Image (cartoon, rainbow, N blue to C red):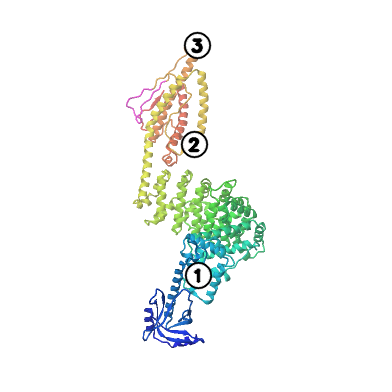
Amino acid sequence: MGELEHREAEAGGDAAAAAAAHSSSMQRVKVYRLRDGGKWDDQGTGHVAIDYIEGSKELGLTVLDEEDNETLLVHNITSEDIYRKQEETIISWRDPEAATELALSFQEAAGCSYIWDNICDIQRNLQFNNLGDESFRSVNGELRELPPVDLSNLPLILKTILEGGITDQMRVAELITQDRDFFPKLLDIFRMCEDLENLDDLHMIFKLVRGIILLNSPSIFDKIFSDEFILDIIGALEYDPEVAKVQKHRIFLKDHVVFKEAIPIKNVSVVSKIHQTYRIGYLKDVVLPRILDDATLASLNTMIHTNNAAVISLLKDDACFIQELFSRMRSPNISLESKRELVLFLHEFCTLSKSLPLVQQLRLFRDLSGEGVFEIVSDVLQSEDKKIVLAGTDIVILFLNQDPNLLRSYIVQQEGNSLLGLLVKGMVTDLGEQMHCQFLEILRILMDSFTMSGAHRDVIIEIFYERHLDYLVDVIASSCPPRIMTRTTSDSAVTGRNIEVHRLKPEILLNVCELLCFCVVHHPYRIKCNFLMNNAIEKILSLTRRREKFLVVAAVRFMRTIISRNDEHLIRHVVKFNLLKPIIDAFVENGDRYNMLQSGILELLEHIRKENLKPLVIYVIESFSDKLMKFEHFGSIQAFKLKYQQFLESSETKLSASVPDMRKKAEGRGLEKEEEDYFNEDSDEEDSTRRTKQAHNDEVKASVSNGSEADDISSRPKSGGLVDYADDDDEDFNPPPKEPDRTAEDDELLKITTRKQKLVNSADGKHADGEVRKRQKIETRITCGKLSALTSLASKHKDSLALSSPSCEANGVSGEQAPHSDEQQHSAETAETSRQTGGDCIKTMGNLSSEKTVNTTKANDSEPYSVR
């Protein structure tokens, strides 16, 4: 072709003419014919076009002379002709009619490429149209066989695969599987086209291999992913026509992918499946990620899952393999690189075990636990290599997700509990890559009360609270800016702890706070004792002094968690030590900025209001009303103050209603009881027995009241009440007359005269003596009831009475903040008054028996009452 190239060089022309010829689809060429002897004859220069040949329906090449417009060449394009593109400007082929070689030498490379693309498209369409030939189908239209695998039939095979229905595709997959020579012949054609750099045919082979993969046949996958064909299959997929640059997947797999055996695997089947699994994953994730449909992708994932299960099953059944793995990891002479490879292998081994059935997974993890996997993890967590530390935490999480009790049992039985300490320390250590979140997740699962069972449930929690909780709290306290403490506590200082002050990442402090909130929810009683004794809540609230807003919000969330428990002791602790002050200060400092901090604090106050937490409502308003004044435009603040007013009005109403009704209740209950006892009385012996028992019961009641309820009663205001003697026997008596218009505040002189009766005769002496004693008792009870009512009335006006004991003095409004219900307060007040009145009654009985007068003066210096 040297002469042809030389003559082409002589054919000149300016670029403008070439561009015009290209735009009109008429390319300027020289026509050459090969004569005998291997010489090329110049047939002339003209313009070539592709169009329908005159008088036929077939497309062909037509070259018209540029001078006289005569026809220089007419060629019918067929699917059988083989066209060749040489260099960038020559297209040649063999003309069967002329029995010679023809060539077109183009003036411009662009014109040559244009004609070449049209020739290829015409040939491809002709080949597809020829697929209507029924030579490969049976009478009923079923595909009998595939066309022979050669370069000319590739378009036909491709059309069969792409345009057939589901039935045809299943049949094609079956025929490909049955034909042992299909893939060897196809890959031979691929290698030949790659050697010739025939990109058009390589693009067609890419489409053909892609179509075969999309048939989604497991039997085809077994062949193409075998060691024999996989590299050539991946090579064929490098020539994607939609990608401008040819990919280099085979070079990467050969030169950069190295199979490392941390432990030599002697089973050849296991090694083969490991290689196959990697290739499937590479093809799925790298080579064809945008081409695979959902069905094919699911099939490839199933193959990977199945291979992983087979590999893990074969390895776990090999006892020697597992023992050798752990013995090497325990070896003191192992190098850092080897140790790293072994840890990564163990991590991958545990991860792939999820492919096994659930029962086999549990058995495998129990076997690994028995071999000492947690001892190895403890050693790994102390490494300076962050990558293997991350692998160690992943291994722990895999075990916790499978069976948390395996790790709990190890921690309980371990001397010193070093693994739990390493997990806690790892949570507050900056290992990068968000690894502290891994430790947080481990500790959450480890102490999750909902998943705990067995004998280790309480032990693991006890170990954490005794040895590690204070450390986490001190981490927060030492990482926050100091301030002037409002209360002196000796335990506020951090001593004996290796804590980096002000150097921890804010994310670590956030995770510690989240773990403490988790503990409040899951271990409310255990953590309450720690908080009340160690001043932990105030230390955690020091987060409000951090400049990071999300840490301040975390502190608010912690307090919200504490209050949501509705624990009486914790609420008292909050009120006593003014623990809401940091929260309110942060709220005031935030101002009117609408953010998470503002919303969190408003929600906290709203929760207190809705749950009717009276001590907290009163505490907040009375302590911070001046600070909250500028936020009254918030509806939640207004509702909070309204709740406070309701509590005050309710307390005043109860206080004013309790005193006037006390005297009436005392008289009514006393008279009814005396009448009932009078008619139930039989003899003096029974009366004496009852009095003895009642005296013993009164002592028991007094001791119980002074012991169990003394603290609660002493903190609440007292009111007068009637002492109810259950064993008193009643006789006829004349009740004291009442004035019709007398009120509780306007008491007048009350006179009760004892009547002396002499013994009538010896026969009735016993009866007479008993009657005298009974009447004395009845009169004494009336006196005690009146005195008790007077005592209550005097307490209301805050004046002392002559017969009032010191314990009857009111304690102000301290009882108003006690977290007890009104019923409990009333019962406690009644018990206290009973003790007071009982003592007064004993004195009165003595005075009555000696016929002395007891005088008492009202607070307003009115006329004294006289008891004779």
The question of residue 161 being in magenta is answered with no
Badge count: 3
Amino acid on which the number 2 mark rests in the picture: Glu
Disc marking residue 154:
1
Q: Which element carries disc 1, helix, strand or loop? A: helix
Disc marking residue 172:
none
Earlier along the polypeptide chain: callout 1 or callout 2? 1
Label 3 near label 2: C-beta < 8 Å? Answer: no
Q: CA distance from mark 1 to mark 2?
A: 99 Å
Q: Residue at x 62, y 59 (%)?
A: 379
Q: Position of residue 693 (x, y in %)?
A: 52, 25
Q: Nearer the viewer, mark 2 or mark 3?
A: 2
Disc marking residue 763:
3
Q: Position of residue 653 (x, y in %)?
A: 36, 37
Left or right for 488, reference 17: right
Disc marking residue 709:
2
Q: CA distance from mark 3 to mark 1?
A: 142 Å
Range covered by the magenta-colored residues: 736-753
Q: Which element carries disc 2, helix, strand or loop? A: loop
Earlier along the polypeptide chain: callout 2 or callout 3? 2
Amino acid on which the number 3 mark rests in the picture: Ala
